Amino acid sequence: MDADIFVIASSPVKHDVFLSKSICVLQNGINELPKLNQITSLAGAPVIAVVDRTADIQLAARELVAASSSFGGSSPYSPDIVLVNEFKRKDFIQAAISESLRLQNNKSASLTEKSKPPLPTLKDCEMVHQQPNLTIVHRTKRSSILQSTTSARLLVLHSISSLDDAIDLINSKTSSPCLAAYHFGNPATGKYLSQFIPAQHTFINHVPRDLLIGPPIPLSTTGSDPKQRYPTTLFSVPRPVYIKETKTGAEKGAADLLAEATAPLKQFKRHPGGGVGFFEQGFLINAGFIVVSTLTCTGTGLFWLWKWSRTV
Amino acid sequence: MAHPFPRIEAAAIDGRLHTLYHRQVQLERLCKALIANVNEIKQAIEQDYTHTFEEIATEYHTTLTTVKQHYSLLNPKEAHEEEYLVANGRDAPHTRAPAGIVYIEPTAHTFFYSSIVPLAAALAAGNCVVLLVSTHFFPHFIKAKLTQIAASEQSTFASRATTENPHLIFGCGHLCHCLFAGQARCVP
């Protein structure tokens, strides 16, 4: 590439005018909302995963182990916390351990030998499984969830009792949307979780492997395709040119304009809705029982009276 | 304060990469340099990270595929037609112009992918690029390798242009001016 077109800077550029006039791709994220010329993501946005009772546990274990251990576990899209339904926790841990061992056996021939950096000390965790390619820990206390992020081959679990428990927990820990959320369960569960756990990208029952390579997908108001991280439209500005005049039709006088505007709105026909309310249903059923039993007793009584009067 | 990169600023003001041919040349050279140095790049990634061989190959493959994809979307004929839509009396609502200069600060995770993919996208969009590669911070080997590749590429081109074909630069420049949106002198 030409030296006029491409240059390598050996230290971060701090020139204010330069930074405000160029498009800045800041892959390490920033702490406030980006300016129009910044292509970046919010730093510190967590990545969460939820494994529901209705999930395919083997699939969830496979996907989450791959997400936590691929590319050294340092991908911005590896999950920071995995919330597993307490009834499925044991099954999930077993599946995750066997998946981790399977991967280790497959990769043992091709894993490059390196001394691994020591794991940071994690508080309130009980160690479940420790291997060079993945460490699984169970975080027992809620207060320390999402307090720190590590870039290591680490899978952090926590038990939840229900979907609503997961939603409340996540919403109490973060105010900004998650970077990504992975939900494992049936499609209806996925829909519910995706509606109430705000995340920039939500994936149901899978973790795309391409996501684990490269920086976080940049924030954009027009939506972004997870398959193409940097489309060329991010680096160009729209400059539309219009030569044809948009004709507004015949010129209308003021009276016509007002008449057209004051025509009533064409309302959408809604069902009256409600129907019979819950308490009204209860009242009616009870009233029905009482009326029916009263009528039956009265009828039987009258019948016997009539028979008795006949015999007398 | 003086501009930190005067040559880049000059090239951006010129609009040197507005023409598609120049963008194609830049991407061709980028691709060629990356392909020629595949083994060194692989080794550098291996030394920096604890990735498996499959992961390194996947990263390299994804990066090169993206570069080639950006290259394949550059269509000079289409771009020429779009440029002259208004001259032919039609609306041009989708016209886009390059932003000018793009400054990239890549993340340390999969540094090769993280630096090359936005670089290729920015070049394909017609911008001049400043890429931050500070070898003081992790990952050291791949950063050193990329700096080396860029330096040797630029020196090769500069020396080749002046010794073999001194008119190459000027020929390219003339073509640039004819197709540059602002210049109305050359009517095709």
Image (cartoon, coloured by chain):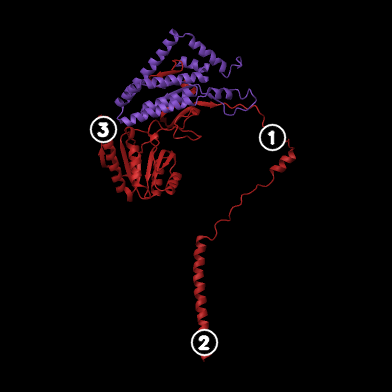
Chain colours: A red, B purple
Please tell me which residue is depicted at 50% across the width and 77% down the height of the picture. Answer: A296
Q: Give the CA separation, mark 2 to mark 3.
A: 99 Å
Q: Is the Cβ of the residue at disc 2 closer than 8 Å to that at disc 3?
A: no
Q: Nearer the viewer, residue A146 or A222?
A: A222
Q: Residue at x 46, y 35 (%)?
A: A225
Disc on the earlier residue, 2 or 3: 3
Kind of residue sitting beneath label 3: Ala
Q: Which of marks 2 and 3 is in front?
A: 3
User: Who is closer to the viewer here, B124 or A87?
Assistant: B124
Name the residue beneath numbered marker 3.
A109
Q: Which amino acid does label 2 sit on?
A: Lys
| Gap between marks 1 and 2 measured at Cα | 90 Å
Is B109 located above or below residue A88 in the figure?
A: above
Q: Earlier in the sequence, mark 1 or mark 3?
A: 3
Q: Which corner quadrant of the image does residue B130 belong to?
A: top left
Report in which chain the residue with disc 1 lies.
A
Dot 2 corresponds to which residue?
A307
Q: Position of residue A276 (x, y in %)?
A: 54, 61
Query: Marks 3 and 1: in contact by CB < 8 Å?
Result: no
| Local crowd size for mark 2, using a 10 Å CA cut-off: few (<14), some (14–19), many (≥20) | few
State which chain disc 3 sits on. A
Q: How far apart are marks 1 and 3 (CA)?
A: 72 Å
Q: Is mark 3 on a helix, strand or loop?
A: loop
Q: In this view, does A28 lie above or below B162?
A: below
Residue identifier under label 1: A248
